Image (cartoon, grey):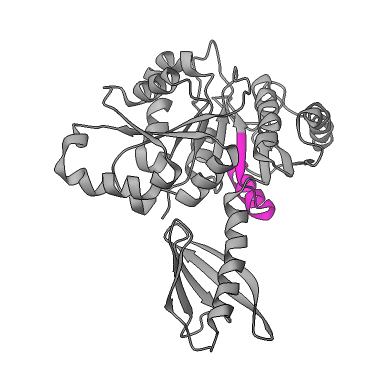
Amino acid sequence: METFSVKFTTGCLDLSAIVTAFDHYRQFKVEMVTNEPSPILMNRSLDGVWTIVKRGERKISDLGFQELQAAIEIQLDKFKGVTHMLVLTDFSDAAQNACMYAAALSKQLKTTNMMLYHSYESILLPPTGFTPVGSKTADSSEDSLTKLTKLKDMMQPLVSPKTEIKIQSDERTLVTAVNMLVQQQRAGLVVVGITGKSKLERVLIGSNTLDLANDCLAPLLIVPPVAVFKRIEKIVFACDLRRVSESTPVLAMKGLIDALGATLYILNVDRDGARFNPDTIKEISDLHLLWDGGEPEYHYTSHEDTATGIMEFADKIKADLVITVPKIYGFFESILHRNLTNKLAYHTHLPLLLFREEL
């Protein structure tokens, strides 16, 4: 659910409205005042076709409704774009690499605003996996800002001349700070590096990474230490056939994929022969309904090790990025398991993009 305001014209009147979006931005409630008894209700198909379910009590003409729908479309374009990016750093080598990756990626995404953020709150936490600080931690807010400024200067040549890079540092807890900044900056993407330990022994392990994966309000891009940016042209979306229509954040995913101009490969993770279960027919139909407009390729894997099967497929097609929705599919949790790190060490060149489940 997302609530925002719009302004539109009907006849000679300039009106303001409060819009609440539901169901992957496919259902909309429009109110002129909060909690009004008879709001406007409208539906929008994934192809952008609007239907009026309930016109409300105000006498708005058909042309007025077209103006209202156009105003909502402008807001949707903002939500699904990545004009604002939030990049996290702990000043480690891995974090610096992620920052350089983000800077190069911003050109492809046509990002206009980037915020470089460091939290020095977790200085006393054990250094497991990614933490907001590392071996090169800042000793003070002044030191942190000095390092952020230096990092900004390194990133500046990699971004578009139209991209503004801002810096911020404070002592807030990481997840709290990230989500507040996402909302304040309208960030469409959060980028973070992975700090490995002793030959990638603890790649992708750490409570802060898990917290971000579960609670970050914006899509979270996790950049491995050895990742080198190349234009993203092939994307693997790893999913399974469970609650496809209800939970897939289609608008946000399509917005980012369209911004990248990449080809989408949808990889269905088959568990316990689910691909051949008659009960999955509806889910398969829903999957195609959501994505066929973008002409993706559909593939299946029944690898006994889900994470390895996904990454092997990504390598096979020479993918540049893997997308998943961790709360639905459990993929991210599975690759975090210590027993899998050795298997996945070979694949740590490939960034992972996590989208939140639609509720």
Residue 181 drawn at (x, y percent): 67, 49
Left/right of residue 106 with respect to residue 341 in the rendered view? right
Residue situated furthest top in the rendering:
199
> In percent of the image, x 74 and y 44: which residue is there?
112
Please name whichever residue, 288 or 202, is drawn nearer the observer in this view of the structure.
288
Say which quadrant the C terminus sits in: bottom left
Magenta segment: 174-191
Left/right of residue 96 with respect to residue 293 in the rendered view? right
Q: Is residue 358 magenta?
A: no
Please name whichever residue, 212 or 112, is drawn nearer the observer in this view of the structure.
112
Q: Is residue 294 above or below residue 127?
A: below
Q: Quadrant of residue 225?
A: top right
Dominant SS of magenta comes to helix
Residue 95 drawn at (x, y percent): 66, 26
Residue 30 drawn at (x, y percent): 52, 75
- Residue 4 visible to an observer of this rendering: no
Residue 208 drawn at (x, y percent): 54, 35
Q: Quadrant of residue 265?
A: top left
Q: Is residue 189 magenta?
A: yes
- Residue 268 visible to an observer of this rendering: yes
Q: Is residue 72 above or below residue 311?
A: below
Please name whichever residue, 170 or 22, is drawn nearer the observer in this view of the structure.
22
Q: Is residue 54 above or below residue 190?
A: below
Residue situated furthest left in the rendering:
278
Count of labels in the image: 0
> In percent of the image, x 55 and y 11: which residue is there?
198
Left/right of residue 75 with respect to residue 311 in the rendered view? right
Q: Is residue 315 above or below residue 187?
A: above
